[in-house]
Image (cartoon, rainbow, N blue to C red):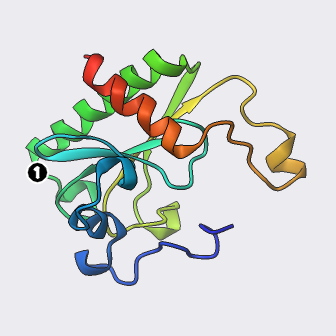
Amino acid sequence: MAYIQGENKPVSDDSDGCPFCLLLESGQPDSDSLIVARDELVFAILNLYPYNPGHLMVLPYRHVADYTELTLEETVAVAQYTQRAMRVIRAISAPHGFNIGLNQGPVAGAGIAAHLHQHVVPRWGGDSNFMPVIGHTKVLPQLLGDTWKLLADAWRDVD
């Protein structure tokens, strides 16, 4: 409900109001900001409102909204970090599959459309059950801090 009601949504389309940019500028430890890993051009962060445990996003540091605005180097870095994220998640939780995707613009489902982010969502057979359909709630059997620790530790070990 926090997400639906607009909590942590950007106040503007520029980097001054972008929650991702603000988080990067905050100086918080990665464990508090849920940043799993950093590279020169991109970083991986847990989704604050995950669909499943391990749901993370890969983002360029540069504040761009559209996939076509990425440089070639950023495009490669996003792709490589997405592959790495998949290997890490497979190593720690053995999902049956993944949803990988970019939502371009609010009409396409982008909650924070001003800063490009690629979702990496682990999926398991039967992970969509009666709770979201009947109970209008999602059961997540793992705390974000615990998920962060597993992913951050595995990120260093998995190639």
Q: Is residue 77 above or below residue 83?
A: below
Question: Is the residue marked by circle 1 packed among few (<14), some (14-19), or many (20+) residues within 10 Å?
Answer: few
Indicate the quadrant containing the N terminus: top left, top right, bottom left or bottom right: bottom right
Q: Nearer the viewer, residue 41 or 102?
A: 41
Q: Secondary structure at mark 1?
A: loop
For this view, does 123 lie left or right of residue 20?
Answer: right
**Residue hosting label 1:** 71
Amino acid under label 1?
Thr
- What's the residue at 54%, 21% (across, down)? 93
Q: Is residue 9 visible?
A: yes
Q: Nearer the viewer, residue 140 or 69?
A: 140
- Quarter assignment of residue 61: bottom left
For this view, does 154 lie left or right of residue 69?
Answer: right
Q: Position of residue 159 (x, y in %)?
A: 25, 16
Q: Is residue 58 visible?
A: no
Q: Position of residue 56 (x, y in %)?
A: 44, 42
- What's the residue at 75%, 27% (across, down)? 126
Q: Is residue 2 above or below residue 83?
A: below
- What's the residue at 17%, 53% (across, down)? 70
- Quarter assignment of residue 148: top left
Q: Position of residue 59 (x, y in %)?
A: 28, 50
- What's the residue at 90%, 50% (across, down)? 134
Q: Is residue 133 above or below residue 1?
A: above
